[in-house]
Image (cartoon, helix red, strand yellow):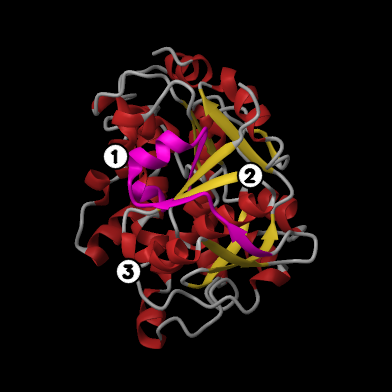
Amino acid sequence: MTQANRYAVLGAGHGGKAMAAHLALMGFEVALWNRTPENIYVIKERGGIELEGPERLPTGFSQLALVTSDIAEVLEFADVLMVVVPSSAHADIARWAAPYLKDCHIVVLNPGRTLGAVEFERVIRQNGCKTQPLIAETETLIYASRSDGPAQARIFSVKETVPLAALPASRTHEVLAALHAAYPQFIDGISVLHTGLNNMGAIFHPALTLLNAGRIESTRGDFQFYIEGVTPSVARVLEVLDRERVTVASAVGIRARTALEWLKMAYDATGNDLYEAIHNQPGYYGIKAPALLNHRYITEDVPMSLVPIASLGQQYGVSVRGIDAIIRLACIIHRTDYWRRGRTTESLGIRDLSVGELTQYVMEGEK
C-alpha cells in the first residue's frame, strides 16, 4: 500500500472538522462528507474550515478539495476514508458506502470502540460489497478538539501515540505506511481485539453517568464529573467493571491494560486504587458532567462498548455481572433494549467461533 494522497473525512462533528482542517493544512487533498447537507452548508460555501490550535500545529484557513453529502462522490475522490462519527453510526456508514467501496480503499474508524472493524466488515458484506477494502480502527481519537462554529474548529491537543489495527492484523503495516506522512503517531495496535478491549471509555463513561443520574438530572450536570462524581463507592464499581474487562480480554488471549495502568500511561496519574488515581489526575478537574442522561456516554458507550465486551465474556465463560448490571440500568433508564441494539457476537457473525478461530480471524482474516 503506497502513501495516501487523498483523504475523505466522513463526519463533520467536533473531531471530523478538526481532522479535515488539519489534514488540509498539512498539504493533503481532503474531502469532507456529512449526510446532512445543512451541517456542512457554510463550509461548502466558504470552501474550507478555519482552524485554531497550539503553536506547533498549522492553523488558519484550510482549503478543502470537496465538501459533499454524496457518499458515491466522496468515495470516488479518496484513497483513505477517515470515519469520524459516533460508533453507533458505523453500521449506517458501512451500508451507505458498501456499493462504492473499491479494493484500493482504506477505511479507518476513529475510533472503533469495541469490535467496530468487525461490524463494519460484516455490514458491507451483508449489503453486497464484493470488493476488498482494507478496514482498520484506532483505539482512541487522535485529537482533543471541538467545533467553534459552522466553519470553525479548534484542536486542543494531538495525542503522541495512538494504537491502530487492521482487520486482518497481518495488513496493519500497510495502513501505517499509507498514513505515516500525515499521522506518524499511529502505532501497531496488534489486533482489533487489542484496540477494542483497551477501550477505557467503556469503563469510565456509562457507569459514572448512571451512578450519578440523580445529580445529573437535578443539577443539569453542574458538578465536576470525575472529581465530585467519583466517590470511593463509585470507584469500587469502576474497579469491578475494569476487572471484568481485563478478564474477558484474558479469555481471548489478550493482555489488556488496567485502568490504573492506563491512567499512569496517559496522564502519569498514580494512586493506591482507582479513586486516588483519578483524583490525582489534574486534567480531570473542571470537567463538568453531561447535562442530560441522553448522552453518548450511555447511548454510544453502552451498545458499542459494554455490550460487545459482555457478549464476549458470556461466549467464553467469563462472569460479567457488573457490566451486565450497568447495561440493564441503561436499558431501564432509557426504556430501550441496548442488548438488541448493540454489538453482540451473534450480530457480528462471530458467535460460533472458538478462541483460536476468533484469533485467526482478527489476525489473518479467515473464519
Cα distance in 3D space between marks 1 and 3? 26 Å
Instruction: Say which element carries label 3.
Output: loop
Q: Amino acid at mark 1?
A: Trp
- Quick check: marks 3 and 2 in contact, CB under 8 Å? no
Q: Of all residues shown, which one is farthest toward the right?
A: 56
- Residue 294: image tag: 3
- Residue 96: image tag: 1
Examine the structure image and report whether residue 212 is included in the region drawn in magenta. no
Judge whether 314 appears above or below 173 on screen.
Answer: below
Judge whether 65 appears above or below 127 on screen.
Answer: below
Examine the structure image and report whether residue 78 is included in the region drawn in magenta. yes
Instruction: Say which element carries label 1.
Output: helix
Residue neighbourhood size for the residue with mark 1, other residues' Cα within 10 Å, grouped as few (<14), some (14–19), many (≥20): some
Q: Quadrant of the C terminus?
A: top left
**Magenta stretch in the rendered image:** 60-89
Q: Which residue is mark 2?
A: 28
Cα distance in 3D space between marks 1 and 2? 25 Å
Of residues 47 and 317, the one drawn nearer to the viewer in this rendering = 47
Q: Amino acid at mark 2?
A: Phe
Cα distance in 3D space between marks 3 and 2? 37 Å
